[in-house]
Image: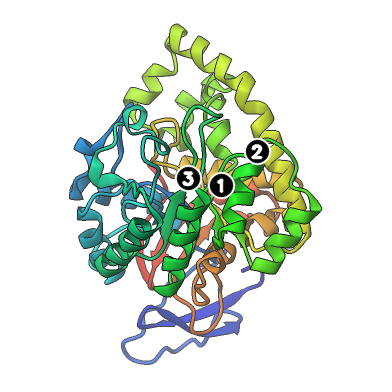
Amino acid sequence: MSAPSSLLIKDGRISAISAGAGPADLPQGVRRVDMAGRFLVPGLNSAHVHVGHVVGIESGIRFYTRDRVEEQLALYAAFGVTQVSALGMSPPLFHEIRRESQAGRLKGATLYGAGPGVGVTDGAPPAKVMNLSDEQVARPRTAAEASDVVDQLAEAGVDQIKLWIEDMNGQLPVMSPEIAKATADAAHRRNLPAVAHVHDVSHARLAINSGVDVLGHGVRDEEIDDAMLAAMKQGGVRYIPTIQIDEAEYIYVDRPELADDPFFKAAAPEAFRKRMADAAWRETQAKKGEKNRPSVEMNKRNLAKLHAAGITIGMGTDSGATPMRIPGFAEHRELALMVEAGLTPADALRIASEGSAAVYGQKDRGVLKVDAAADLVALDADPVADIANMRRIVSVWRAGEQIAGAPA
C-alpha cells in the first residue's frame, strides 16, 4: 500500500481497511503492529513449482520427506512467497502434507498442487533424466486409463490436474490428443483446472484444442499468432510464462558474483554455490546458454503480447524441479524478467499475487481488500518504484500471523 493506511485482521482475514494509522485506542484483545514507513503488498503466489525433489545439487525420490518439503515451504516464505502450487512429481506423501498445510498446521508457504500429475509412457517427464520413480508420475496408455487416473487423484485430494505435453525437441513421444482431451475432460468433471506442461507452439495448440485451462509454461520457440490468441480468449485459457526456467541455465555463469550476494546465498545451497566456481561446469552451462537465451527472449515477447491482450497471467518458475531452479531466488528473478519484458513493476506484482490466484480461480488471495486472506509482505522500500525493492523484505505474514522475517 502506497498511502498511510491501517488494516484490521480477524480470523486470518482482512476485516477492515482505513486511511491513516487507525484509532489510538484499540479494543481489548486487538494487537497493534506498527508498520510505519513500510510498504505492504500481498504475499507472492508461485503457481508452478515442485517440492521435495532437490537437495543441494542432487534430485530424486529419496529426497521427498516431510522435513524436506517443510524446509522448502519455509524457504519460500522467507522470500515473500506465501502460497505455492506443486505441479507434479509428488509421491503419495504429498496428499498428507497438502492437507495439513492448507489447514494451517504447517509453517511456511501454503501448499497446493497436483500430486504426481499425468505424463507420457516413455516420454515426458523423462524418468531417467529426472530420477523419477513410478509413484511420482502417472503414465496412462489410453484415454480410459487417463480418466481413471484423474478420478483417483481427485479422490486423494488435489487442487489441479497436471499433464505433460512435450516431446523434448522430438526426442520423446508426445502425449496423444485423445489422452490429453480425456485428462482435461475428467478434470473438468471433477471441477479441477487442467494445467499443461508445454514448450513449443505446437504443444500449446494441442493443449488448447484438448480443452486445458492453463498453459503451465510459456511458448518459447516462436511468437504466438493471432489465431492462437483468439483460441485462448475463447477458451478462457490462462498462462504461466516461467521465464526463469531457461534463464536458470546460464545466469550463474553470467553472474558469478551471485555466489557472494547475501540475498542469493539465503536461497542457494552451499554445494550449488561451490559448483558455480567449477571451470568444467561453467563451460558446460555456457554452452547451454547459447540454446536458452533465445527461449528467454521469445518467452518475454509472448508474455508482453498476451498481457497486452488481457489474458489472465500468473507467476510460476518451476523452482524445485532441478537444482538450477532455486526456490525463492527464482521467484524474484521472474519478477525482474517480467519487467524486462516491458511490464511495469505494478503489473509484475499483480501477476505474482492476484494473477496467480486468478489462474486457479481463487478470488480471496493475492489482494489487499476486505475479506481477503491476510497473506502479506512488509517491505522497507516501494516495489512499484523498482521491482528490485521486493527483495527488501522486513516480515512475511500468512493468515495474519508472522511466519518469516528477512531472508538470512
- Out of 188 and 369, give the one closest to the viewer: 188
What is the C-alpha distance between the residues marked 2 and 3? 19 Å
Q: State the image coordinates of residue 312 (x, y, percent, origin top left).
A: 64, 63
Q: Tell me the number on the disc at residue 261.
A: none
**Residue receiving disc 2:** 220
Q: Mark 2 falls on what kind of element?
A: loop
Q: Are marks 3 and 1 in contact (CB under 8 Å)?
A: no
Amino acid at dot 3: Met
Seen at 46% across and 25% down, the residue is 260
- Out of 137 and 258, give the one closest to the viewer: 137
Amino acid at dot 1: His
Q: Are marks 2 and 1 in contact (CB under 8 Å)?
A: yes
**Residue receiving disc 3:** 175
Amino acid at dot 2: Arg
Seen at 54% across and 29% down, the residue is 170
What is the C-alpha distance between the residues marked 2 and 1? 9 Å
Colour option used: rainbow
Q: Mark 1 falls on what kind of element?
A: loop
